[in-house]
Amino acid sequence: MKSKASLRRLILSNFKLDVLLVISQAINENLPTEELFYKFENLLRNDLNIGKVLVFSYNNEKWECALASGYSVDTATTERLEKDLARYTEIANIISINHPVLCVFDVIIPVFHKNKVLAYVLIGDIEEEREGVSPTIKHLHFVQTLANLIIVAIENKRLHQDNLRQEAMRKELELASKMQAMLIPSSESLPDNNKLFVSAYYLPYSGVGGDYYDVVKLTDDEYGFCIADVSGKGISAAILMSNFQANLRALFTSRASLKLIVTRLNWLVMNNAHGEKFITLFIAKYNSITRTLEYINAGHNQPALFRAETKTIEYLSLGCIGVGMFNNIPAIIEGAVTTGKDDKLICYTDGLVETENEKQEEFGTENMERCILNGKRVDKIIHDMISELDKFKGSNVYADDISILGIEFY
């Protein structure tokens, strides 16, 4: 006949197996996090007669109280406990500890997964002298096992949800990138005739970017050019730039003066971005009969004008501040130059000249000028610039959008 001790051990073993089965089924059924914690709480409080339970878990890059039963906890308590719990790497009894929170608990159980701590389980008011199942210290490893099962399952659920969100975001970015690419003129659509030849390069920083360039045929003899850069990067910059592109296309006509266009764009950007972002741009009109290039440089990198006859470079700097900086632009100065045969204009965004090498040196305008002064056709110049830039940066990654717009005047 079995002794009472053997019978209690058998009851306890069956109890543990039943609990493990219930928890495993709950995990397999993919129950919500709240229900898993409810089962854990019910087990500890009702079946194992534990009076107080706190679970602090690491979620979304911060510690938070995932379960509080038999003890109230506030945000201040969570923040205060974060450093205090970090020193516990295994099950520990809390004895005579002078701490406003830890002193009311008996045991700390850290929960690890792949050498990373996911949670701390604090239990208190352990009833050890009771008939039936009793959570004595020798059974704490069973509690730890349950905590590991539940918390690791919750962590895996969170990681899975994060992966789904990241995949959805990746698809959205991919779609946004395709849509933005439709707004950027393709190489085939750029002018290539007996008046001028246009070539360009575009490399967004992260699939979508805040750079933009455009070429608009205004009349048979007149063309409009623009290159622009939104402050910042990513989705918000891309959205603002898409809105800017639509407005620019609507405003850019042969009759509209450059000053009027820039003034109107400033109002639109201020209205859309509320002063949180601004746009630098270089905008110009070219008349192929008079060979006059009128322009406004609104806080943008100064385009380089290569003079074919003298083999020299001059920079186009006249203009104003960027659009979206102030409600009203203080002053706008319009510049004008006359182009010679085979002169070339290179417009670019700061991602080109500010790209750094492994020594944290910037590519700068000197390297750009060397490529321009070789006298090649404008598309070859752009190709050489990108090739030199790629070699210059070495193992560094590009840290900004890069756009280049080159015009060769015949």
Image: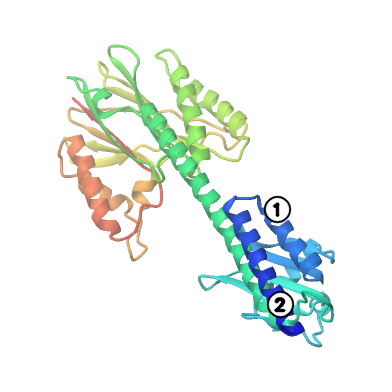
SS at circle 1:
helix
The answer to which of 350 and 103 lies nearer the viewer is 103
Residue 261 seen in render = yes
Residue in the picture at 72% in, 66% down? 55
Mark 1, Cα crowd under 10 Å, few <14 / some 14-19 / many 20+, is few
Question: What residue do we see at 52% from left, 51% from top?
Answer: 160
Q: Which residue is mark 1?
A: 35
Distance between mark 2 and mark 1 Cα atoms: 23 Å
Q: Is residue 7 above or below residue 151?
A: below
Mark found first going from the N terminus, 2 or 1: 1
Please state which of residues 400 and 258 is positioned toward the viewer in this rendering: 400
Residue 328 appears anywhere in the view = no
Give the percent coordinates (x, y) of residue 34. Answer: 70, 53
Helix, strand or loop at label 2? It is strand
Amino acid type of the residue tagged 2 in the rendering: Ile
Kind of residue at badge 1: Glu
- Spot occupied by residue 247 in the image (x, y as percentages of width and height): 49, 22
Residue 185's spot in the image, x, y percent?
Answer: 33, 27
Quadrant containing the N terminus in the rendered view: bottom right
Which residue shows up at 61% across the image and 38% down it?
275
Task: Determine whether, in the image, residue 3 is placed left or right of residue 104.
Answer: left
- Mark 2 closeness class: few <14, some 14–19, many ≥20 residues within 10 Å: many
Q: Residue at x 19, y 44 (%)?
A: 373
Q: State which quadrant residue 278 falls in.
A: top right
